[in-house]
Amino acid sequence: MGRRGVVRAVDGVDLDVRAGEVLGVVGESGSGKTTLGRAVLRLVEPTVGDIRFEGADLRALRGRELRAVRRRMQIVFQDPYTALSPRMQIGQILAEPLRLHRLVEPHEEPARVARLLRKVGLEPYMADRYPHEMSGGQRQRIAIARALSLGPRLIVADEPVSALDVSVRATILSILLRLQREEGIALIFISHDLAVVEQVADRIAVMYRGRIVEEAPAAATLTRPLHPYTQALLSAVPDPDPGRRTRRIRLHGEPASGAPDGDGCPFAPRCHEAQARCHEVTPPLEEKARGQRVACLLR
């Protein structure tokens, strides 16, 4: 906490996501993942910094210009039970963004809705149902279809499977990835579960207390993590092969929310490798291996 009553949920984050790429953002609850995703879409307003999308400075846009850009940036929320209006039929939910942005004529809406439903593996007749008549997995398919309805170039998926039964998570992930590849969409996939991110991401950014502590291609993060926090997260992922189990790294204390005030590594109080200088110097996020950026003084 800096000024009284002010918490910096995200601090000094520098990231990019390329067209057609899946960027996984992983970290514990309170690490700033959701705030980062919403700031990218300007659903929350950052106090400082730049947000650029396809060359446009989003923070400089207002009114009609911002609305036009937002057509190409969509979000899939965590909870499919609260993301959909209970008073609207599925067809109305999917047609609403098309109507608001005047993309189709009224008589074209049913055919477009049917096409969206088929894309996510649902039948067109389900357009007449209400959300309470759908399962959790089906609702999340509807949320994905709604995000796709405007032809976005970027989707932020905020914990899109964490509220679902384990039995349907793989199906939802498969649908999301198939559509992302078919449409060439950039996807920011937010999760607290490194095992889930492992299945979907091309690159992984690891957040701790509002900052990126490691960012690298997924293969490098999963096979040779450099930051002690990333190593701890990876050691907690269950492995069905007992012969490949790695030593469990236990963290000291409890995670804190918000970027720390003052100097020092934000992870130092919980790090099993921390030295005196780790509590005094804030490590920059810099390249330590090819394509692998790490914020750690000991690497």
Image: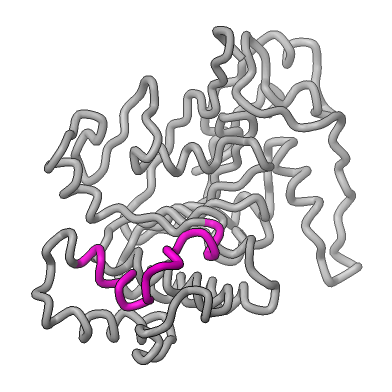
Query: How many numbered callouts?
Result: 0
Q: Residue 134 lies in magenta, yes or no? A: no
Q: Is 260 located above or below residue 102 in the figure?
A: above
The structure residue drawn at horizontal position 35% and vertical position 43%, both measured from the top left corner, is 41
- Describe residue 69's horizontal placement relative to residue 256 as left or right: left
Q: Is 67 located above or below residue 166 in the figure?
A: above
The structure residue drawn at horizontal position 53% and vertical position 74%, both measured from the top left corner, is 172
Coloration of the structure image: one colour
Picture quadrant where residue 162 is located: bottom right
Residue 12 percent across, percent down from the top left: 48, 24
Q: Nearer the viewer, residue 58 or 112?
A: 112
Residue 126 percent across, percent down from the top left: 40, 87
The structure residue drawn at horizontal position 80% and vertical position 28%, both measured from the top left corner, is 271
Residue 56 percent across, percent down from the top left: 19, 38
Which quadrant would the C terminus be assigned to in this image? top right
- Describe residue 174's horizontal placement relative to residue 278 as left or right: left
Picture quadrant where residue 219 is located: bottom right
Residue 35 percent across, percent down from the top left: 50, 37
Q: Residue 93 lies in magenta, yes or no? A: yes
Picture quadrant where residue 94 is located: bottom left
The structure residue drawn at horizontal position 64% and vertical position 33%, both measured from the top left corner, is 208
- Describe residue 268's horizontal placement relative to residue 81 as left or right: right
Query: Can you name the residue that lies furthest to the front here?
Result: 87
Q: Which range is magenta? A: 78-98
Q: Is 168 located above or below residue 64 in the figure?
A: below
Which quadrant would the N terminus be assigned to in this image? top right
Query: Can you name the residue that lies furthest to the left here?
Result: 105
